[in-house]
Image (cartoon, coloured by chain):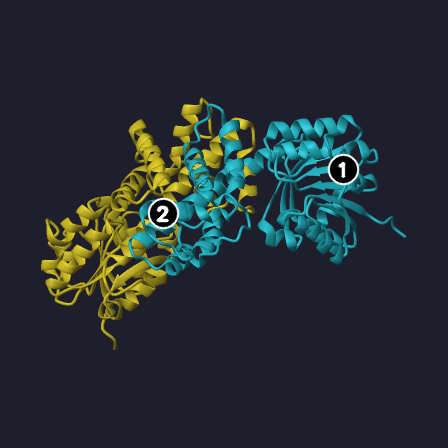
Chain colours: A cyan, B yellow
Amino acid sequence: MSKQLTAAVIGLGSMGWGAAVSLVRAGITTHGVDIREDVLTQFSSEGGVSFTSVAEACETADVVFIFVVNGPQTEDVMFGAGNAVASAKPGTVFISCVTMEPSRATDLAARAEAAGMLAIDGPVSGGSAKAQSGELTIMAAGRAEAFDAAQPYLDAVAAKVYRLGDVAGKGSQMKMINQLLAGVHIAAAAEAMTLSAKIGLDLGVVHEVIQECAGNSWMFGNRGQHMVDGDYTPHSAVDIFVKDLGIVADEAEDHPVPLSHTALNLFKETSDAGMGREDDAAVAKLLASKSGIKLPGMV
Amino acid sequence: MSKQLTAAVIGLGSMGWGAAVSLVRAGITTHGVDIREDVLTQFSSEGGVSFTSVAEACETADVVFIFVVNGPQTEDVMFGAGNAVASAKPGTVFISCVTMEPSRATDLAARAEAAGMLAIDGPVSGGSAKAQSGELTIMAAGRAEAFDAAQPYLDAVAAKVYRLGDVAGKGSQMKMINQLLAGVHIAAAAEAMTLSAKIGLDLGVVHEVIQECAGNSWMFGNRGQHMVDGDYTPHSAVDIFVKDLGIVADEAEDHPVPLSHTALNLFKETSDAGMGREDDAAVAKLLASKSGIKLPGMV
């Protein structure tokens, strides 16, 4: 009889939740940690094992997935208040799925390895639906030993794992490039949709036609639908792109990234206008307000 | 025996050429007009009938496709030196496939109709490969009578014809929205690829991974490949986007389009640096130069 696999998932937001229930579905004992009691209750009812203490959740885990919001929170989980690395068994694989500065990802992995752990820098893409179905894309870097140990766990949560090198940081670099494009494309979709509304085109028709044309993007298809429907329920919030395009702007240093800066300013303005926790498609509402027009869902 | 169909195609650039050979392939007598002798010789060898005079090419045509560079050239073909409308039979369908200001498209169609012609405002998308295979997407507007008369000709050149209304101008509006997105996405791809090069990611791997992630766009897939290959053979030139994003900036008036402006400035700078006739992916070379890095194909 094979050994029972045990994972911990720190942070049960939309992506972490999806990964956690995918692990449960794969028959893996899954320890879930979140600060929200209702989420933990829900996770227990889905067959997970709920914890309020990061350290306790990590004690018996073979693999720890971290799905918190940003780099500082990840550091706190691993080495600060969470104390995950100190409480885990030697050789536990820490997989950071958080979007953070590549330099920080390199540093956190090195510190985990120095403490006897294995580490994978593994930011994800795919959105909450793909997380829920265990079909994430992971942009991953780390030593072969870490990938070998984590294989069945990665299989449970991901449709595709790109191995981008042996050194942590390469995964976060790729994710940063993805976020640059994703953020600019959301803002471009907002610009296109609001200009369409201004000149009297039907937004549903624009959304249909452009998807068959060279102007299409994954984000135009996905977030464009939110704009057509006037539905700003946060799948991914405006403030996420304030953070992620901020990372692009910082890490680019003197490399010119004028579109990233322009999009970052739009997300900041949208957040400053009180929409930071709405869906990132809300950048369209900011542009509509500036132009004096109404999109679906605007009162 | 059914009547032999006859079309004229004015302008045998990459898109016009593709449409013209698709018409020939469909068994339609096709009159091609271009100012380049070698292109006309080639067209004759493909089974087309070559003309140097627009007016003569249009005299016996049932449908006239216009594939010149911009609005002023279209006006010149129809009502100026080309004299196409005056020389055509009453009821000939003029299909403008040119990207131009929507207001101009409305005006030219109205003048053609006043002269006894039918008119379709029908800009295209799909690139030269789709043009060549007769699988263009056409964003079309015009009266039902015009579409009825042009049906077999549209079938020969297009996989999909979107009917966007009875009034010319709606097709050009949709094309303008497509060009806004396409232009911003090309510039974003350039920003992403050059930043990738700067931080030491393999461009081929970036191109592969991002296409599976939420940062993907049609342009990232297509023009990104040009950047990976260092191949700036013009499929569509930098100067086309100087024109098309210029139309966006003008027609938007006081509607905010900050990303379009940022991308337009990059295309202008690229053109000013002597790359106006290179592939529009050359905007990546501009950013690389500013950053002091070399992309494939840069000496």
* Location of residue A189 in the rendering, given as x and y in whole percent from the top left corner: 41, 48
* Location of residue A75 in the rendering, given as x and y in whole percent from the top left corner: 68, 31
The residue that mark 2 highlights is A289
Q: Amino acid at mark 2?
A: Ser
Image quadrant where one finds the C terminus of chain A: bottom left
In which chain is the residue bearing label 1? A
Q: Front-most of B35 and A253?
A: A253
Whether residue B222 can be seen here? no
**Above-or-below relation of B210 to A119:** below
2 or 1: tag closer to the N-terminus? 1
Q: How many marks?
A: 2
* Location of residue B195 in the rendering, given as x and y in whole percent from the top left corner: 49, 30
Please, what secondary structure does the residue beneath circle 1 have? strand
Give me the residue at 79% from left, 54% from top. Answer: A27
Query: In the figure, is residue B98 to the left or right of A185?
Result: left
The residue that mark 1 highlights is A93
Whether residue A138 can be seen here? yes
**Above-or-below relation of A252 to B216:** above
Q: Residues within 10 Å of mark 1 (few under 14, many from 20)?
A: many
Please, what secondary structure does the residue beneath circle 2 have? helix
Q: Front-most of B155 and A40?
A: A40
